[in-house]
Image (tube, grey):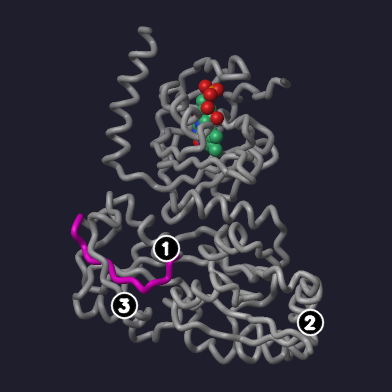
Amino acid sequence: MSPVYQFTVSPDFPTKRMSSWFILNTWLQKATDLHIHLELYPDFASQRQAIHDDAVDLIYANPFDASMLVREKGFVPLLRPQDKSDECLVAVKQGSPIQAVEDLAPGCRVASTEDPDVNLVGMMLLEPADLDRHNTQPVSVDSYPLVAKALFNDDADVGFFLEDAYSELSNLVRKELRELVRSQISDITHVLLSGPRLTEHRERLIQTLSAMPGEPKTAAMLEELGFSRWQVVDREDTEFMIDLMDALMA
Amino acid sequence: MDRAKLEDMDPADVPDASRELVLQLYGIGARRVWVSDREVPYPDGRLIVSTTDTAGIITHCNASFVEMSGYDRDTLVGSPHSILRHPDMPAAAFQQLWDEVSAGRIWHGYVKNLRRDGAFYWVYATVIPNVRDGAIKSYTSVRRKPSRRRVEEAETAYRQALAQEASA
Ligand SMILES: Cc1cc2nc3c(=O)[nH]c(=O)nc-3n(C[C@H](O)[C@H](O)[C@H](O)COP(=O)(O)O)c2cc1C
């Protein structure tokens, strides 16, 4: 009997993309003739547990986890979405007196989700105001629309958004928000990695996924995921990103 | 060991009023530089990233690094990192950086960097050793925008350190 490989996606994808990942997986199984089960974990903690239990073979990982997967779990990076980096946007409520990051003062309340890379980059964007984890108050919520809500309700002074999630807020919501700064770190992206059990099928996965833009049906699937093509990543690109993440977290 | 090479700055690249100085760089020797008083603000939202080999030769850098330094990538890769050395930086700061990272530790600090056009920019830098299989393979520096208050503190501290180094 052929083995069942376990596929998972970093829990920071927008909820509306959930079905798109299932559609991709159904197609991927047919196209590669591999038996792949897609498991979407509700949060980072449960996904990390699965990784630690070696219950993951293929993962679309956020840059944080990519570092751990390569270093500690022997995963190998295969592909990354082209022209789609993980950027963070810092915003306030439209009527807020805060005009620039430098206007924020110690003690200010920061609304964010649990996305680790967005929170890391977001805090970094506040550093020019001498703010850090120790002199700000976290306001943790479950989703980006709730970050916006925390700002509207004056439960927070400033909020962190994944750039993508910000652009997917309704126009009505976005009109009530004002962007202070956004990151432009094109070096940090999600990565598709494969684990030790998939070693012999790595090439097949790369070939199959890279060919997606060539067919209207599969090109549309990628479009649904928010990017237009996969880009092959070499070891050196990933090492650079991992070193960068290590330095950012240091 | 081969001596790394670093050319003098070209005064034709420096549009502002500037002073001419000679830096003594480790493993390289003298480098003539032209330095102006123009500060280029750190670009919002960016990270300036570079990787060096264990001798401090640049092996990899990102687009923001290229843009802020004013050199093209081909010049930067293969050059010693002291290509950005500003004469207002005390030697002690870099001594400390190298002592820390070569011992496998992390270094954080404020650095004033010299651009190809003689202007300068301040960064908050984190330098880490990249350890593979128990050995240091390379170093990575990630810089971000410093707060004005921290820059002013660093300016004062560095001025004092430079005066001490000059009288030593
Ligand atoms: C990863 C890394 C990044 C560095 N970045 C800088 C830098 O941005 N600017 C700088 O002047 N020196 C930087 N240095 C230190 C230089 O290697 C060098 O020590 C310094 O410019 C002083 O020159 P000297 O050692 O020849 O006296 C860096 C070193 C490492 C290992």
Say if A212 sits above or below A96 in the image. Answer: below
Amino acid type, residue under disc 2 in the picture: Gly
- Label for residue A214? 2
Q: Earlier in the sequence, mark 2 or mark 1?
A: 1
Where, by quadrant of the figure, is residue B17 drawn?
top left
Task: Judge depth for marks 3 and 2 and give the one in front.
Answer: 3
Give percent across and percent down for residue B112.
Answer: 42, 33
Amino acid type, residue under disc 3 in the picture: Val
Magenta residue check for A115: yes
**Chain under label 1?**
A
Say if A140 sits above or below B90 in the image. Answer: below
Q: Residues within 10 Å of mark 2 (few under 14, many from 20)?
A: few
Q: Is residue A236 shown left or right of residue B48?
A: right
Say if B71 sits above or below A11 in the image. Answer: above
- Residue drawn where x is 64% and y is 71% of the image: A192
The CA span between labels 3 and 2 is 40 Å
Give percent across and percent down for residue B108.
Answer: 41, 39
- Label for residue A182? 1
- Residue drawn where x is 29% and y is 58% of the image: A100
